[in-house]
Image: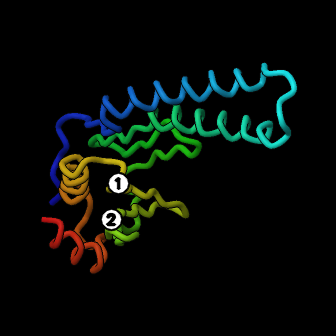
Amino acid sequence: MMKQILTEETFSSPKWLKIICYFFGLLLVVTGFGLLMQKNLPQDIIFLIPLLLLIAVSMFMHTRLKLIISDMDIRFTGGLRRHQFLWTDITGIDMKLVGKYQTPICILYYGKKSLELHRGFYFKRQFNRILSLLEMKAAPELFSRQYQTIRRHLI
């Protein structure tokens, strides 16, 4: 029997990281516009301006990412692709290790889409809490063997 999630929980990047992103994002925007206002700017530097602005926009978007887990559904907002689905829509839950440091990524499959939750975005405690909520609410048969193996190593 699946347990009930009593309160809606929100997971996002930590406040200190948001402050750093806002500060450096604003610094990149000011630098980009400062370069744009220069006269007789070399051609090589003109191509840097859109890159600086793109990085700044990415930093601002990163601060808006939120994962909201409630008893009814799961929502991921703030990015280019929004996700919102009911617990009953989940067709599978998998996990894989990626990169040099074997960072775990939890993959939620629903409908014909999937949502990847990267351990690198969340702190270890937050990521473990997310996994606990998934295990508490989703049916045990939805978890892959690979998920269970990696999860045992995380604990």
In the rendered structure, the answer to whether residue 11 lies left or right of residue 135 reads right
Labels 1 and 2 touching (C-beta < 8 A): yes
**Residue in view at x 39 percent, y 49 percent:** 86
Q: Is 43 or 73 nearer to us in this picture?
A: 43
| SS state under label 1 | loop
Q: Is 44 or 112 nearer to us in this picture?
A: 44
Q: Earlier in the sequence, mark 1 or mark 2?
A: 2
Q: Which residue is mark 2?
A: 103
| SS state under label 2 | strand
Q: Residue 75 in the image: x percent, y percent?
A: 41, 42
Q: Is 30 or 17 nearer to us in this picture?
A: 30
Q: Residue 58 in the image: x percent, y percent?
A: 56, 39
Q: Residue furthest bottom?
A: 145
**Residue in view at x 53 percent, y 60 percent:** 113
In the rendered structure, the answer to whether residue 39 lies left or right of residue 79 reads right
In the rendered structure, the answer to whether residue 48 lies left or right of residue 41 reads left
Q: Residue 79 in the image: x percent, y percent?
A: 53, 40
Q: Is 121 or 20 nearer to us in this picture?
A: 20
**Residue in view at x 44 percent, y 43 percent:** 76
Q: Is disc 2 surrounded by few (<14), some (14 to 19) or many (20+) residues within 10 Å? A: few
Dividing the picture into quadrants, the one containing residue 35 is top right
Amino acid beneath label 1: Gly
Dividing the picture into quadrants, the one containing residue 20 is top left
Q: Which residue is mark 1?
A: 120
Q: CA distance from mark 1 to mark 2?
A: 7 Å
Locate the C terminus and report the quarter of the image it occupies. bottom left
Q: Is disc 1 surrounded by few (<14), some (14 to 19) or many (20+) residues within 10 Å? A: few
